[in-house]
Image (cartoon, rainbow, N blue to C red):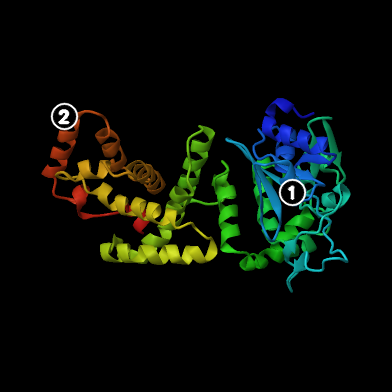
């Protein structure tokens, strides 16, 4: 049912080693679900009855991580695998502090070890509760996950109202899995998404940023927005389909662009001073929602500032602009803005031509701009439709 040639050899070797040491070990979660759904599996997570300390003893190249959810990273030169111990989902008599919930029901810590049977029932959705042993090629399915994959439907394990209280991010995960797999969402899950969505405000901005990346950098982001945001998401999806690199920085620059423009536009014109002054404020507000790593702040601001410089095409400015390390990302965003605004003035084509390794063409392009004394040179910044 699952082709082992598509499974990481390193993951198979880790499972083999755990079983040699008399522990149960399975591939679990997304890699099994995707393999059964006709999608190339990528993240190979392992579940076992070995405790984190026991896993650490078996594999020298490993480390125990996490307080809220303790697990082990096992790694080699090219791969890193997450090995998690079966959870019971219930507090034991010996350690009352191992499973902690807040007043709303959200799980703050879950380090109560359990059995395979218990672990099956504490996972979020049935399609994610499939345990595959690549040695015996058998699948453990206690929640009819195989049937729900066949029916193409996302179903919660247990009452979704309670399960979304335990972890509100499950509402985003349900939407993401539905979009990624092309599955319908069970009506009970839909109701829980609406009823418990407000609990997302209690989730750390770091977890929300992680979920943002999974949703919008997964190759199907254009389901979620419109205009310049839609064009940016389509651009990202196309790059993923073409095996090109993608970065959250580019996408955030695009998604926050309408907010930045609205802050500094008046009477269909951008106030350049407000433009520069508003950048940090826009990023600070986003930081409260999703913990955008600081390394992306300068990347985002470079793309924004270069939009201004890309409108300036006189004298030696184009040569300075094209040498900027963020030029290519800024140029790509310019094309996104141009398409979203249905602008026909040819700014994107001008820069496409200027990138050609032809000095005479470059001199000709600049000479034509120097002859002009209107909005096409450098006096007006922004496309008409994005300023309205």
Q: In this orientation, which residue lies closer to the viewer: 331 or 122?
A: 122
162 in relation to 223, above or below: below
Element at label 2 = helix
Image-quadrant location for residue 152: top right
Element at label 1 = strand
Q: In this orientation, which residue lies closer to the viewer: 271 or 71?
A: 71
Horizontal and vertical percent for residue 42?
64, 37
Q: Contact, CB < 8 Å: mark 1 with mark 2?
A: no
The residue carrying mark 1 is: 84
At 31% from the left and 50% from the top, the residue drawn is 307
Horizontal and vertical percent for residue 205?
56, 62
Give residue 168's mark. none
294 in relation to 11, above or below: below
Mark 1 vs mark 2, CA separation in Å: 62 Å
- The quadrant in which the N terminus is found is top right
- Closer to the chain start, of discs 1 and 2, is 1
- The quadrant in which the C terminus is found is bottom left
**Count of number-bearing discs:** 2
Horizontal and vertical percent for residue 338?
36, 45
Q: Is residue 360 left or right of residue 307?
A: left
Q: Is residue 125 left or right of residue 272?
A: right
Q: Is residue 225 left or right of residue 17?
A: left
The residue carrying mark 2 is: 360
At label 1, counting other C-alpha atoms closer than 10 Å, the crowd grade (few under 14, some 14-19, many 20 or more) is many
Image-quadrant location for residue 77: top right
At 30% from the left and 66% from the top, the residue drawn is 274
Q: Is residue 296 left or right of residue 72?
A: left
Horizontal and vertical percent for residue 176?
65, 49
At 31% from the left and 62% from the top, the residue drawn is 275
Residue 227 seen in this snapshot = no
Residue 251 seen in this snapshot = yes
Image-quadrant location for residue 298: bottom left
């Amino acid at each position: 049912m699952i082709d082992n040639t598509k499974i990481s050899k390193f993951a198979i070797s880790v499972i083999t080693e755990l079983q040699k040491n008399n522990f149960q070990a399975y591939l679990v979660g997304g890699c099994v679900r995707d393999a059964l759904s006709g999608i190339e599996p990528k993240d190979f997570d392992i579940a076992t009855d070995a405790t984190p300390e026991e896993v650490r003893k078996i594999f020298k190249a490993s480390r125990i991580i996490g307080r809220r959810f303790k697990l082990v990273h096992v790694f080699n030169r090219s791969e890193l695998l997450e090995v998690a111990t079966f959870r019971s989902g219930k507090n034991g008599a010996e350690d009352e502090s191992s499973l902690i919930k807040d007043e709303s029901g959200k799980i703050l810590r879950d380090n109560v070890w359990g059995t395979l049977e218990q672990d099956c029932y504490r996972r979020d959705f049935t399609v994610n509760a499939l345990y595959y042993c690549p040695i015996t090629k058998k699948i453990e399915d206690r929640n009819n996950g195989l049937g729900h994959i066949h029916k193409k439907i996302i179903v919660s394990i247990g009452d979704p109202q309670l399960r979304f209280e335990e972890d509100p991010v499950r509402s985003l995960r349900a939407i993401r899995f539905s979009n990624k797999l092309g599955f319908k969402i069970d009506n009970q899950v839909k109701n829980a998404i609406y009823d418990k969505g407000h609990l997302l405000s209690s989730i750390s901005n770091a977890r929300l940023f992680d979920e943002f990346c999974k949703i919008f950098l997964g190759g199907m982001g254009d389901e979620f927005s419109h205009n310049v945001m839609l064009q940016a998401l389509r651009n990202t999806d196309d790059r993923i389909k073409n095996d090109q690199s993608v970065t959250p920085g580019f996408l955030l620059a695009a998604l926050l662009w309408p907010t930045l423009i609205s802050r500094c536009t008046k009477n269909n014109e951008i106030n350049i001073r407000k433009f520069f002054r508003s950048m940090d404020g826009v990023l600070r507000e986003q930081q409260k929602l999703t913990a955008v790593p600081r390394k992306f702040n300068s990347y985002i601001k470079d793309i924004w500032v270069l939009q201004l410089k890309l409108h300036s095409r006189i004298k030696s400015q184009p040569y300075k602009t094209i040498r900027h390390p963020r030029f290519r990302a800024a140029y790509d965003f310019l094309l996104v803005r141009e398409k979203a605004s249905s602008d026909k003035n040819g700014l994107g084509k001008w820069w496409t031509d200027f990138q050609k390794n032809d000095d005479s063409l470059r001199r000709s392009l600049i000479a034509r701009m120097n002859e002009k004394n209107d909005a096409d040179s450098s006096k007006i910044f922004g496309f008409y439709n994005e300023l309205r």
